[in-house]
Amino acid sequence: MGLLSVEELVTGKRSDGREAEDFSGGVYEAAVNQEKQDDRRSQVEVGGAMLEVGGAMSEEEEVSVAALNTDQSGRLRLDTVDDLFNILQLRKRRRARKTAVARKQPEAEIIPAVVDVEVFLSASLDNKLPLVDKYLTDGGNPDVVDHFQRTALHKAASKGHLEVMKRLLEAGASLENRDKLEATAVHWACRGGHVSALELLLNQGAKITCRDKLRSSPLHVAVRTGHMECAEHLIHCGADVNARDRDGDTPMHDAVRINRFKMIRLLMMHGASLHARNADMKTPLEMLNAWQSGAKSLLCSSSSEQPGV
């Protein structure tokens, strides 16, 4: 393996585009000879402009190059950890400069002459406000739906795209439209965990008591998906902490079943019952005891099968 010059360590490039494996026979000696040629050129470049891609060095880079520990022939000496740190920092800065030069500005969104329903719904999901605005400005219906009966407001709420949501609401989008599971935009905001979207919907008059096809309230959804901020906001806005879904489960049943400790504590702080019975006549406390008992039985049986343990 050939030695690397200061230039090569700084830039990560081989001078003249040559690789060490180009040498056949006497590899080490040939590499050293090549390195000496590289060193003579790199010394001139380090003293002057330094590197084709870098252009003129900044004062900070000149100090960094001067701080490199090299021998009389210009080869890098890695005698201390500081020597390695200096060269890595200089390479990092040069790489950042090249990236900054190469980085292109994002191209402006091309707005078609006509935005159809499919593009409009996709734009609502992807936060492409210009396309949404074009569709609505041309008189499009803000409450059109996809095959799952989801509206643009459902999609934007699930992703927390506030500006798109505001534009849809300005155009008259309904707050209470339901998809095939009878979920509203409030359910979707909770499912996505976007408390700002939830706040916007509730401030606009969306119902906190809405239920989906499984009779789940928005609080049920927030608890199941583990979105603490949404659950807190719903409770502060008056959500029923003991609401029951189709199976008779309260949010506390869901929190215990999925073992969401923070949710359990939040619900308890706001008066959730530990004794409400679901359709299986189980309270949250009994569900917890049954789970612990089952886990204990499993561990005990496993232990008995391993006598050496």
Image (cartoon, rainbow, N blue to C red):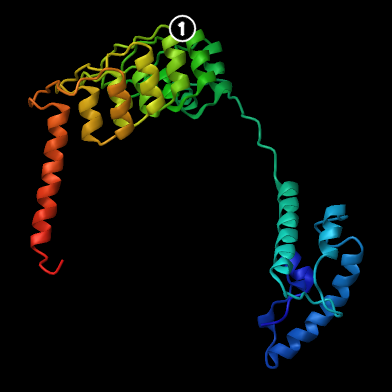
Task: Pick the quarter of the image with the C terminus.
Answer: bottom left
Q: Amino acid at mark 1?
A: Gly
Crowdedness of circle 1 by 10 Å Cα count: few (<14), some, many (20+)?
few
* Foreground pick, 257 / 10: 257
On the question of residue 262 being in view, the answer is yes
Residue 248 location (% of width, % of height): 14, 21
The answer to whether residue 300 is left or right of residue 73 is left
At x 35%, y 27%, the residue is 191
Count of marks placed on residues: 1
* Foreground pick, 101 / 187: 187
| Residue that extends furthest to the bottom in the rendered view of this protein | 25
At x 85%, y 71%, the residue is 42
Q: Is residue 136 above or below residue 36?
A: above
Residue 97 location (% of width, % of height): 75, 51
* Foreground pick, 306 / 237: 306
Task: Pick the quarter of the image with the N terminus.
Answer: bottom right
Q: Quadrant of residue 106?
A: top right
At x 48%, y 20%, the residue is 196
Reading the image, the residue beneath label 1 is 172
* Foreground pick, 169 / 265: 265
Q: Is residue 103 above or below residue 9?
A: above
The answer to whether residue 175 is left or right of residue 50 is left
Residue 291 location (% of width, % of height): 15, 40
Q: Is residue 11 above or below residue 227?
A: below
The answer to whether residue 48 is left or right of residue 164 is right
